C-alpha cells in the first residue's frame, strides 16, 4: 500500500521569524501598549506622579495641566475650575466681615502703631466729644469709676480675639491666592491655630471672669465660639493642603 497517496491529517507550521517571543511593545490583545506620559505644570515644574498639587507653585492638578485632569484626579481632591481661589475668596471675605462686626480691634491697633489716643466712647457730659473711657456709677455706694478700653474684658479682649482671627483669615486668603508655597501654607495653618486657641481661651475665660460693673460672669461669647469651630476646620484644611503638596506623596 502506497502511504504517500493518503491525505495528510495534520501539519505543524514552520516557526515564525519572531519565535523568540511576542513583541514587548504589543499588549496581549495585539494593540500597542500605552506609553508613559510625563506631565509638566504651567509653571514649568514636572508634576510628581500621584500628587494633587504642583510641588513648586501649589496649583492643583486641574489647573496645572490646563483642564486636562483625569476623573480620578478630580475625585481625589482636585477642584475643577475654581482651584484654591474659592477658598481664598471665602477666607478674605469672612475676615473682612469679622472686622466690620468688631472694628474696635483694628482701630486700636492702628491708633497704637501711629501713637494716637484711641477714643471709642462718647464723653458722659459733653456731646460730640470722644474719650478713651467709660464712666459708671455704683448705685449703691454712689462711687463713680472711669474704665479704660483695655480695662474692659468684654471689650478689649473680645475685640482682640476676633481681630486676630480675622487677620489670620485674610493672610490665609492671600497665601492661597498669590503665594501658594507649601511652607507658607503651613505657616498660615499655624497662625490660624494660634488665633483659634486665643478665641478658645476667651471663650473659657468668659465663664470665669467677673465683670466689675455687673458683678457677674460675662457669659457665652458667640463670635469666639464660631471662630473656634471654623478655626479647627480651616487649620485641618491647611494641613491637608500641606500634605498633598508634599513631593514624596504617592497615590496607591
Image (spheres, grey):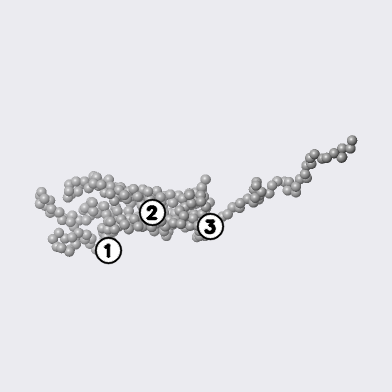
Disc 3 marks which residue?
40
Residue 92 left/right relative to 71: left
Residue that extends furthest to the top in the rendered view of this protein? 1
Q: Identify the image quadrant of residue 120.
A: bottom left
Q: Earlier in the sequence, mark 3 or mark 2?
A: 3
Residue that mark 2 sits on = 188
Mark 1 and mark 3 residues within 8 Å of each other at the beta carbon: no
SS of the residue under disc 3: loop
- The circle on residue 114 is 1
Q: Residue 62 placed where, x, y %?
A: 49, 55
Q: Position of residue 41 (x, y in %)?
A: 51, 58
**Residue 186, image x and y in percent?**
41, 52
Q: Nearer the viewer, mark 2 or mark 1?
A: 2
Tag 1's secondary structure? helix
What residue is at 87 percent from the left and 37 percent from the top? 3
Name which residue lies at 29% across and 58% down.
100
Q: CA distance from mark 2 to mark 1?
A: 26 Å
CB within 8 Å, label 3 to label 2: no
Q: Is residue 193 left or right of residue 120?
A: right
> Spatial distance from mark 1 to mark 3, Cα to Cα?
48 Å
Q: Earlier in the sequence, mark 1 or mark 3?
A: 3
- From the image, which quarter does the N terminus lie in? top right
Which is more foreground, mark 1 or mark 3? 3
Asked if labels 1 and 2 touch by Cβ distance under 8 angstroms, the answer is no
Residue nearest the observer in this picture, 84 or 179: 84
Query: Nearer the N terminus, badge 2 or badge 1?
Result: 1
Q: CA distance from mark 3 to mark 2?
A: 27 Å
Q: Residues within 10 Å of mark 3 (few under 14, many from 20)?
A: some
Amino acid at each position: 500500500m502506497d502511504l504517500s497517496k493518503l491525505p495528510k491529517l495534520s501539519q505543524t507550521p514552520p516557526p515564525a521569524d519572531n519565535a523568540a517571543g511576542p513583541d514587548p511593545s504589543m499588549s496581549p490583545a495585539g494593540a500597542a501598549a500605552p506609553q508613559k506620559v510625563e506631565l509638566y505644570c504651567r509653571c514649568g515644574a514636572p508634576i510628581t506622579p500621584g500628587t494633587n498639587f504642583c510641588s513648586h507653585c501649589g496649583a492643583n492638578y486641574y489647573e496645572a495641566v490646563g483642564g486636562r485632569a483625569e476623573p480620578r484626579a478630580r475625585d481625589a481632591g482636585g477642584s475643577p475650575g475654581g482651584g484654591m481661589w474659592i477658598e481664598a475668596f471665602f477666607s478674605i471675605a469672612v475676615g473682612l466681615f469679622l472686622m466690620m462686626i468688631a472694628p474696635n480691634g483694628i482701630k486700636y491697633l492702628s491708633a497704637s502703631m501711629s501713637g494716637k489716643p484711641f477714643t471709642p466712647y462718647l464723653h458722659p457730659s459733653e456731646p460730640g466729644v470722644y474719650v478713651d473711657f467709660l464712666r459708671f456709677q455704683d448705685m449703691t455706694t454712689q462711687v463713680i469709676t472711669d474704665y479704660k478700653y483695655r480695662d474692659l474684658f468684654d471689650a478689649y479682649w473680645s475685640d482682640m480675639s476676633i481681630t486676630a482671627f480675622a487677620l489670620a483669615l485674610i493672610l490665609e486668603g492671600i497665601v492661597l491666592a498669590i503665594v501658594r508655597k507649601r511652607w507658607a501654607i503651613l505657616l498660615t495653618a499655624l497662625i490660624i491655630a494660634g488665633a483659634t486657641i486665643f478665641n478658645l481661651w476667651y471663650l473659657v475665660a468668659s465663664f470665669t471672669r467677673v465683670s466689675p460693673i455687673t458683678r457677674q460672669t460675662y457669659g457665652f461669647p458667640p463670635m469666639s465660639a464660631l471662630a473656634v469651630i471654623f478655626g479647627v476646620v480651616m487649620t485641618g484644611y491647611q494641613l491637608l493642603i500641606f500634605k498633598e503638596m508634599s513631593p514624596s506623596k504617592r497615590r496607591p
